[in-house]
Amino acid sequence: MRIIAGTAKKRLLKVPAGWTGRPTADRVKEALFSILGDLVINSNFLDLFAGTGNVGIEALSRGSDRAVFVERDRRAAAAIAQNIKATGFECKSLLMVKDIYSAITELGQIGQPFDLIFLDPPYGLGYEIPVITSLLELKIVSPSGLIIAETGKRETLPPDIYGKALLRQERYGDTMLSFYK
């Protein structure tokens, strides 16, 4: 796993030994950031189910002002911390090692919305709709914000979640990216 573009281009990222997570593939990540384009620049980026921090660190490398990483697995969170340090993004990053809903509640209390929110939950467990609904109920998404959900290709997401419309879906092998605005 590596950073594809930007200030940390070609930096290799650590993955914890024995970790059973599934990091976003470079091909999918490259397609995601090609679609996002300049929206990343100066954005507040939220990386939920962050795993190794792969996607959030890519956003920082490409010009995001700030990234918040939420990961409950302590081994994965340790890898995120190492990866943030290795890429020099400590002052632009916040790592929250806690349950997704606790983190969303805390972020809602802070009251600083995000422009881009990426969630990559374990496939097939149904986290997408409840998490997106919580984000919207707690006003964590900026008015023009974009939510991107990575799912398995067989998972079906609705055309609308709590007032956010499904704008686009792209399939890459077994992975589907769904964009809500």
Image (cartoon, rainbow, N blue to C red):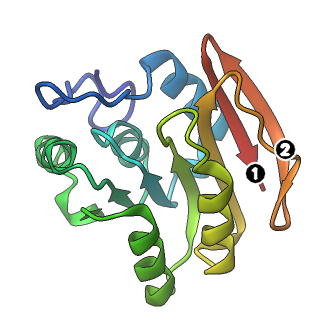
- Say left or right for 8 vs 28: left
**140 above or below 145?**
below
Q: Measured from the top left, where is residue 87 in percent x and y?
A: 18, 42
**26 above or below 3?**
above
Q: Measured from the top left, where is residue 29 in percent x and y?
A: 49, 27
Q: Which mark is residue 167?
A: 2
Give me the C-alpha separation between circle 1 and circle 2: 6 Å
| For marks 1 and 2 on the same chain, the one whose residue lies earlier in the sequence | 2
Q: Which mark is residue 180?
A: 1
Task: For the C terminus, give its image quadrant.
Answer: bottom right
Q: Which residue appears at 59% of the width and 60% of the height? A: 131
**115 above or below 12?**
below
Q: Secondary structure at mark 1?
A: strand
Q: Which residue appears at 56% of the width and 75% of the height? A: 113
Between 39 and 94, the one lying in front of the other is 94
Between 145 and 102, the one lying in front of the other is 102
Quadrant for residue 75, please give it. Answer: top left
Q: Measured from the top left, where is residue 123 in percent x and y?
A: 53, 33
Task: For the N terminus, give its image quadrant.
Answer: top left
Residue kind at label 1, given as amino acid type:
Tyr
Q: Which residue appears at 60% of the width and 15% of the height? A: 174
Residue kind at label 2, given as amino acid type:
Leu
Q: Secondary structure at mark 2?
A: strand
